[in-house]
C-alpha cells in the first residue's frame, strides 16, 4: 500500500532526517578551551589556598601596623607604665641625656600625706564662656607626669624656647596616642608638663588634656602619619616637618590647671585654655 503524507503537500521524513545537522568543532579549538578553563581552575584553587594559609596564620592582618612598637596586653595602669617607660627615653637633650622622667598613674593629686583622686574635669575658655564637665569613671582615665629635675618638675638644663615647649607637647601627644590606641578602656588622658619660664601670662600648673574623641581621627591612621619623624628632635632643635600639625593637635588641649577638693570626696580638676 502506498504511504500517504500526513499533511497535504508535505512528505513524511524520519526523525533522523528532520533533525538539524551541526558540524563538530575542530579538535584544536576544543583543546584551547580546555587549556583556558584548566588554567583558570588552577588560579582559583591557588587563591583559595593562599587565603586559607594566610588568613589562619596567627597575627595576620591585611591592614598595616599602626606602630612598630606596642605595649603588652594587661591591666590599663600596667600598660600605661609600659608606655611611659617607652616614650620617656625617646626625648633627649642635645648631649644625649633624657629630657624628662615620665610617670604614669591613675588621676590623683597629693595634699600633704594624702592622695586625692581626680573624679571630674571642668574646662572653660579664657573669656569664661562655655564650660564643660567630664566625669572620670574609675579605670577610664590615665595621668602622665612629665617631670624635669628643677623646682616643680621644671627642666633644669638649657634655655626655655618655643621649640623645646613644642617638643614637650609632642612627648605628651605621643603618650596619649599610644594610650588611646592600645588601652580601649581609657577615654581620658591627663598630662602634667613642666612649667615654662616664670613670666606674666605663662600658665600655672600647665597640663595637656585629651579625650578619646579629640584624637579619634588620628587613631585610624598609622602613627607615622601624625608623627612622621622616626626619632624626635633633640631639645631646642626646630621641627619644621611636624610643627604645624603638632600645634593644631596640642594647643587646643593645653591648659592652666587648678584643683577644688569636693566635700563628697575626690577633687575636681579645673582647666582654663592657656592659648
Image (spheres, rainbow, N blue to C red):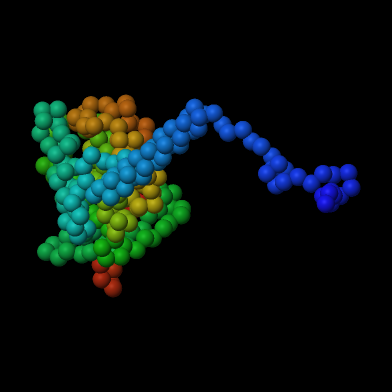
Q: Quadrant of residue 110?
A: bottom left
The residue shown at (83%, 49%) is 2
Q: Quadrant of the C terminus?
A: top left
- Number of numbered discs present? 0
The answer to whether any part of residue 90 appears in the image is yes
The answer to whether any part of residue 247 appears in the image is no
In terms of depth relative to the viewer, which is nearer, 250 or 33?
33
Horizontally, is 247 left or right of 34 in the view?
left
Farthest residue, direction bottom: 264
The residue shown at (14%, 27%) is 94
Image position, residue 228 (x, y; %): 30, 32
In terms of depth relative to the viewer, which is nearer, 67 or 122?
67
The residue shown at (50%, 32%) is 30
Image position, residue 107 (x, y; %): 23, 59
Farthest residue, direction right: 8
In terms of depth relative to the viewer, which is nearer, 216 or 113?
216
Image position, residue 188 (x, y; %): 31, 55
Horizontally, is 116 left or right of 135 in the view?
left
The residue shown at (18%, 51%) is 72
Q: Is residue 49 above or below residue 109?
A: above
Q: Quadrant of residue 36?
A: top left
Image position, residue 233 (x, y; %): 22, 30
Amino acid at each position: 500500500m502506498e504511504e500517504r503524507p500526513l499533511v497535504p503537500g508535505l512528505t513524511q521524513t524520519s526523525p533522523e532526517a528532520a533533525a538539524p545537522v551541526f558540524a563538530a568543532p575542530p579538535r584544536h579549538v576544543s583543546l584551547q578551551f580546555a587549556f583556558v578553563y584548566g588554567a583558570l581552575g588552577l588560579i582559583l584553587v591557588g587563591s583559595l589556598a593562599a587565603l586559607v594559609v594566610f588568613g589562619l596564620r596567627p597575627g595576620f592582618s591585611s591592614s598595616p601596623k599602626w606602630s612598630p612598637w606596642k605595649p603588652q596586653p594587661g591591666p590599663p595602669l600596667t600598660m600605661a607604665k609600659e608606655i611611659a617607660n617607652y616614650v620617656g627615653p625617646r626625648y633627649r637633650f642635645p648631649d644625649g641625656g633624657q629630657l624628662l622622667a615620665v610617670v604614669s598613674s591613675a588621676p590623683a593629686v597629693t595634699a600633704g600625706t594624702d592622695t586625692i583622686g581626680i573624679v571630674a574635669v571642668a574646662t572653660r575658655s579664657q573669656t569664661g564662656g562655655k564650660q564643660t564637665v567630664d566625669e572620670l569613671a574609675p579605670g577610664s582615665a590615665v595621668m602622665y607626669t612629665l617631670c624635669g629635675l628643677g623646682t616643680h618638675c621644671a627642666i633644669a638644663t638649657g634655655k626655655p624656647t618655643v621649640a623645646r615647649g613644642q617638643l614637650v607637647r609632642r612627648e605628651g601627644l605621643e603618650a596619649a596616642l599610644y594610650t588611646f590606641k592600645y588601652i580601649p578602656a581609657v577615654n581620658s588622658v591627663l598630662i602634667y608638663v613642666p612649667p615654662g619660664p616664670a613670666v606674666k601670662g605663662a600658665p600655672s600648673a600647665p597640663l595637656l588634656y585629651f579625650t578619646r574623641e579629640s584624637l579619634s581621627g588620628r587613631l585610624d591612621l598609622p602613627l607615622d602619619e601624625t608623627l612622621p619623624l622616626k626619632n624626635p628632635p633633640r631639645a631646642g632643635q626646630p621641627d619644621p616637618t611636624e610643627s604645624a600639625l603638632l600645634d593644631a593637635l596640642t594647643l587646643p588641649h593645653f591648659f592652666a590647671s587648678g584643683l577644688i577638693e569636693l566635700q563628697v570626696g575626690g577633687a575636681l580638676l579645673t582647666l582654663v585654655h592657656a592659648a
